[in-house]
Image (tube, rainbow, N blue to C red):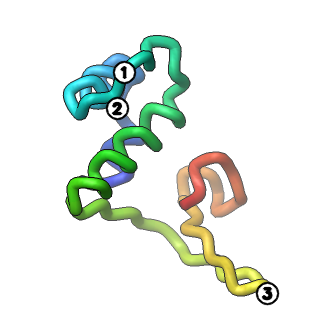
């Protein structure tokens, strides 16, 4: 599954997918939360998740995948 495809999906599509993966009590969840729930379920099933962007490695050793959609700035969509 490509992360970029999830980001392009509507909240309704994400809700349907999350529910099909067994998520409950998510009818009022925000889009970002739904994406996280879906990614977590996919990872738990050992399914491949593909993200694209530029890896920004900070001085403390942590790295974040920045997206051109956000002009490579930090944001809620960072992974």
Residue extending furthest toward the right: 59
Query: Measured from the top left, where is residue 32 in percent x and y?
Result: 53, 36
The extreme top residue here reads 27
Q: Are marks 1 and 3 in contact (CB under 8 Å)?
A: no
Kindly identify which residue carries mark 1.
Answer: 24
Name which residue lies at 41% across and 22% down. Answer: 11
Marked residue nearer the N-terminal end (1 or 2) = 2
Q: Secondary structure at mark 1?
A: loop
Number of the front mark, 1 or 3: 1
Q: Residue at the location (39% across, 63% down)?
A: 51
Q: CA distance from mark 1 to mark 2?
A: 19 Å
Q: Position of residue 73 (x, y in %)?
A: 71, 59
Q: Is residue 52 above or below residue 13?
A: below
Task: Give the secondary structure at mark 2.
Answer: loop
Give the residue at x 29% y 55%.
44
**Sequence-first disc among 1 and 3:** 1
Residue 78 position in % (x across, y down): 59, 57
- Callout 2 crowding tier (Cα within 10 Å): few <14, some 14–19, many ≥20: few
Q: Secondary structure at mark 3?
A: loop
The relative height of residue 30 versus residue 7 in the rendered view (above or below) is above
Residue pointed to by mark 3 = 59
What residue is rendered at 65% in x and 46% in y?
76
Is residue 10 toward the left or the right of residue 30 in the image? left
Residue on which disc 2 sits: 9
Q: Earlier in the sequence, mark 2 or mark 3?
A: 2
Q: Position of residue 68 (x, y in %)?
A: 55, 59
Give the CA distance from mark 1 to mark 3: 39 Å
Measure how far apart labels 2 and 3 are at the Cα level.
34 Å
19 left or right of 37 in image: left
Of the 4 image quadrants, the one containing the C terminus is bottom right
Taking depth in this image into account, of 28 and 24 the one nearest to the observer is 24
């Amino acid at each position: 599954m490509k992360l970029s495809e999830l980001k392009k999906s509507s909240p309704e599509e994400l809700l349907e997918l999350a529910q099909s993966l067994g998520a409950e009590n998510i009818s009022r969840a925000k889009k970002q939360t739904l994406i996280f729930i879906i990614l977590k379920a996919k990872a738990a099933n050992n399914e491949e998740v593909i993200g694209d962007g530029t890896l920004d490695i900070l001085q403390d050793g942590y790295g974040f995948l920045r997206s051109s959609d956000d002009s490579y700035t930090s944001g809620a969509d960072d992974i």
